[in-house]
Amino acid sequence: MCVTSSGRVNSGSLNRGPRDAARNRAALISAAREVFATQGFAAPLSLIARTAGVGQGSLYRHFPTRESLALAVFDENIVELQDLAADPDSTLDDLFRLLVDQITTSIVFVEVIKPVSFGDSRLNSAGARLTDLLEGRLDEARRTGKIRESVTAEDVILAIAMFAAIMERTAESSRKEVAHSAWNLLVQGLAGPAAAG
């Protein structure tokens, strides 16, 4: 916070300094999640810096590219999914519900799981983490007929990417309603005959 010579508080960019680097980084990730969700993935990075209350220099020190910022936001999503997957009582349905919620509220998730995403190997690697996470739950789902035996983790990722593309083009005010309908249709397509009937 900056105080002017007249004693007024300047509420502009708050550069918290190097000792607060971790707090700056967290603020930037939170701001990116919010701005990308409302303005789209092409939103100005300067807006993210302003929303976080830091200068653009601080943004670029932490995240030199838009893609590196996207990866940081995506990583938080993956950690949340990993925590859920680590719970022995969680199911594939639980993971799907969390994924749908993340995609509905996070445009970055949409960008990272696109089948072709920037040609950036780091983003491809991030998508692979999600594939590995899902694979751990698919065996049980196949055995119980929740998912057809032929369905692979890559198939599920493709279905999620299709769902994400719908969300990307849906107005924020309608996303939850559209998400419910679109995801139900995709799950029916993945389900075994008994589950679909």
Image (cartoon, helix red, strand yellow):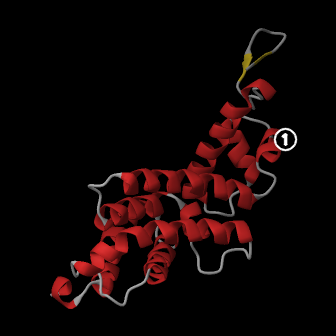
Decide which of 176, 23 is in the foreground and name it: 23
Relative to 120, say whether 66 is above or below: above
Give the image location of residue 130, x and y in percent.
51, 67
* Residue 184 left/right relative to 173: left
Q: Is residue 51 visible?
A: no
Q: In the image, what residue type sits under mark 1? A: Gly
Crowd around label 1: few <14 · some 14–19 · many ≥20 (10 Å): few
Q: Is residue 94 visible?
A: yes
Percent of width and height locating residue 49: 72, 43
x 69%, y 39%: residue? 25
Q: Residue at x 45, y 55 (%)?
A: 82
Residue 115 lies in what quarter of the image? Answer: bottom right
User: Considering only vertical position in the picture, is 149 above or below 66?
Assistant: below
Q: Position of residue 191 (x, y in %)?
A: 27, 84
* Image quadrant in which you'd find residue 54: top right
Residue 65 percent coordinates (x, y)? 79, 57
Tell me which residue sits at (72%, 74%) in the image: 118
The residue pinned by badge 1 equals 57
Q: Nearer the viewer, residue 83 or 12?
A: 83
| Image quarter hosting the C terminus | bottom left
Direction from residue 87 to residue 126 in the image, left or right: right
SS at circle 1: helix
Q: How many marks?
A: 1
12 lies left or right of 163:
right
- Choose between 183 and 154: the one closer to the eye: 154
Q: Residue at x 45, y 59 (%)?
A: 102
Question: Of residues 115 and 81, which is closer to you in this image?
Answer: 81
Q: Quadrant of the N terminus?
A: top right
Residue 11, by quadrant, is top right
